[in-house]
Image: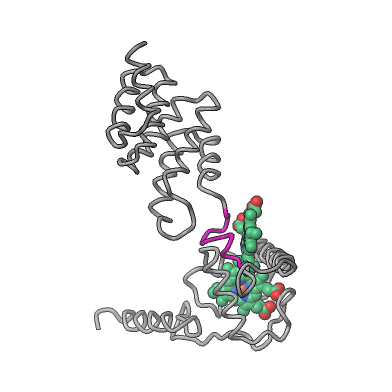
């Protein structure tokens, strides 16, 4: 046999598909791991929480935050779960997760005191806030952090990476308004050049948006680049002949 490990790998692959109960150990043959009948260190979940429910909650945490078990538990990604120490509290994220769980209880208890808007009260979950990420920031918060620390080129690069990774997953709002508002916040800070870089990114993402081109026109005007401003406003008016702002700006630029 050319590769004695391939069969084991295939079996381990199947086992992973079936769930985390059967996993490939570091050495040797597949080894059983199962959810404990009784957790040893449960502080927020009931002590006698049944194994299948513990499994559901842990998989829920993992999915809500877009992380692996090793984000909160001592163990190495890719190694069998039997080698993990799930009882240990040495990774701070585990205890933060407990705090979050208690917070969620307070939130849902508070929500239970108002008249529900539908047949049932709307429940809050970990994923209501986290939406697949450990830090539930908004896109403009994320971009503002990168901009403050590393400048405009890194910010544009960060946008592209985030879009590549999270588009369509609900974690961020990639609609045109977010970049538009972020660009305006830079413009208000007096940073027209960086605002233009963001408005350019927005027309690249939304080439058919009259509003995105209008904002780019405003950015160029703030930079004193009349020619490019004119082009952007013309493009905006072409896409939306009813854009009175663009029409007015064009008259002003041509007249002045
Ligand atoms: C976001 C953090 C987080 C992630 C991710 C996470 N867990 Fe947990 N896990 C916890 C917390 C918190 C507890 C303790 C709950 C309590 O105190 O009641 C716990 C408890 C456990 C326990 C019980 C340990 C004991 O006390 O005996 C097991 C087993 C476990 N997790 C397995 C997993 C597995 C397997 C995964 C991946 C599929 C996972 N967890 C992912 C936070 C996490
Ligand atoms: C009401 C919104 C909200 C809910 C619900 C919520 N979280 Fe969080 N969580 C946050 C915020 C905000 C932060 C970031 C705090 C910071 O770093 O400033 C955070 C941070 C965390 C972190 C630390 C991440 C890191 O590495 O910095 C963990 C772990 C976590 N949450 C787990 C959970 C779990 C598990 C649940 C469900 C039981 C949950 N959260 C529910 C808002 C929420």
Q: Quadrant of residue 73?
A: bottom right
In magenta segment, residue 163: no
Tell whether 167 sits left or right of 33.
left
Tell whether 136 sits left or right of 247.
right
Q: Is residue 209 above or below residue 16?
A: above
Question: Which residue: 45% across, 43% down?
Answer: 177
Residue 48 placed where, x, y %? 71, 86
Question: Which residue: 34% across, 34% down?
Answer: 242
Q: Quadrant of residue 45?
A: bottom right
Question: Which residue: 47% across, 71% down?
Answer: 78
Q: Is residue 66 above or below residue 203?
A: below
Q: Is residue 128 above or below residue 85?
A: above
Residue 129 placed where, x, y %? 59, 60
Quadrant showing the C terminus = top left
Looking at the rendering, the quadrant in which ligand 2 lies is bottom right
Looking at the rendering, the stretch of residues picked out in magenta corresponds to 125-136
Q: Nearer the viewer, residue 36 or 247?
A: 247
Tell whether 184 sits left or right of 6.
right
């Amino acid at each position: 046999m050319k590769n004695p490990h391939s069969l084991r790998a295939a079996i381990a692959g199947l086992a992973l598909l079936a769930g985390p109960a059967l996993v490939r150990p570091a050495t040797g043959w597949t080894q059983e791991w199962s959810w404990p009948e009784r957790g040893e260190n449960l502080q927020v979940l009931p002590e006698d929480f049944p194994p299948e429910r513990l499994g559901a909650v842990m998989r829920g945490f993992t999915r809500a935050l877009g992380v692996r078990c090793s984000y909160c538990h001592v163990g190495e990604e890719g190694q069998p779960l039997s080698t993990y120490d799930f009882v240990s509290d040495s990774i701070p994220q585990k205890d933060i997760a407990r705090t979050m769980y208690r917070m969620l209880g307070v939130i849902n208890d508070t929500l239970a005191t108002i008249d529900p808007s539908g047949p049932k009260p709307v429940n809050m979950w970990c994923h209501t806030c986290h939406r697949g990420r450990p830090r539930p920031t908004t896109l403009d918060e994320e971009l503002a952090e990168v901009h403050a620390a590393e400048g405009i080129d890194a910010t544009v690069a960060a946008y592209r990476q985030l879009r590549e990774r999270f588009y369509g997953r609900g974690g961020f709002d990639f609609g045109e308004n977010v970049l538009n508002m972020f660009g305006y916040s830079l413009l208000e800070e007096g940073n027209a050049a960086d605002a233009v870089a963001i408005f350019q990114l927005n027309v690249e993402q939304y080439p058919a948006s009259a509003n995105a081109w209008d904002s780019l026109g405003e950015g160029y005007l703030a930079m004193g680049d009349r020619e490019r401003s004119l082009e952007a406003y013309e493009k905006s008016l072409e896409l939306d002949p009813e854009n009175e702002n663009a029409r007015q700006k064009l008259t002003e630029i041509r007249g002045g």
